[in-house]
Image (cartoon, rainbow, N blue to C red):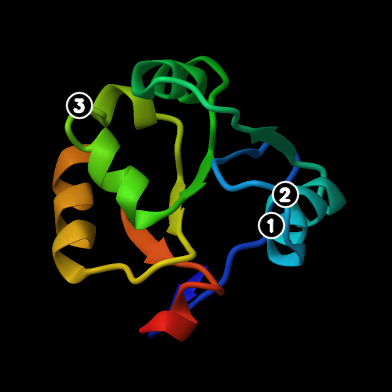
Amino acid sequence: MRTGTEFRFIPTVGDVFYCTAHLSFSYGIATELCIPLMYGAATIIAKKLSVIDTLNLIKDNNVTVFYTAPAFYRIIMQHDVRDYFNSVNICFSGGDYLPEDLKAGWKEKSGKYLTNIIGAAETQ
């Protein structure tokens, strides 16, 4: 739910999270594993794949929540991503500053709103 500048998201059963960060720190474990599983969602934790393999995983698994860093958003924007993100409801960015031009470019390319998640907000 979005109200004003506040953004809240609670996963539900049937959500499929796709995350590209490693589970090597507590934030990654909470955001990418514990919170989704606690609410009955599934989690796909990426290993090193090509961009096309990543996009196909998103499409083939009906991912509903996509989470990665701004640098990876820039990389995948070099492809026609709209068809791969049909099932995605929410795109999060974390771990790095999220520039306004990237948010606007992502909206144009994918048709999806891109927002910061806790962890990235402290760098702004």
Q: Is residue 38 above or below residue 99?
A: above
* Horizontal relation, residue 115 to residue 80: left or right: right
Q: Is residue 24 visible?
A: yes
Q: Quadrant of residue 45?
A: top right
Earlier in the chain: of badge 3 and badge 1, it is 1
Q: Which residue is mark 1?
A: 28
Crowding near the residue tagged with mark 2, few <14, some 14–19, many ≥20 C-alpha atoms within 10 Å: some
Q: Secondary structure at mark 2?
A: loop
Residue depth check, mark 3 versus mark 2: number of the one nearer the observer: 2
Query: Could you tell me which residue is drawn at 57 percent across and 20 percent down?
Result: 61
Please state which amino acid type lies under the numbered disc 1. Answer: Gly
Q: Which residue is mark 3?
A: 79
Q: Secondary structure at mark 1?
A: helix
Marks 1 and 2 close (CB-CB < 8 Å): yes
Q: Quadrant of residue 115?
A: bottom left
The CA span between labels 3 and 1 is 27 Å
Q: Residue furthest right?
A: 38
* Horizontal relation, residue 69 to residue 39: left or right: left
Q: Which residue is mark 2?
A: 23
Please state which amino acid type lies under the numbered disc 2. Answer: Leu
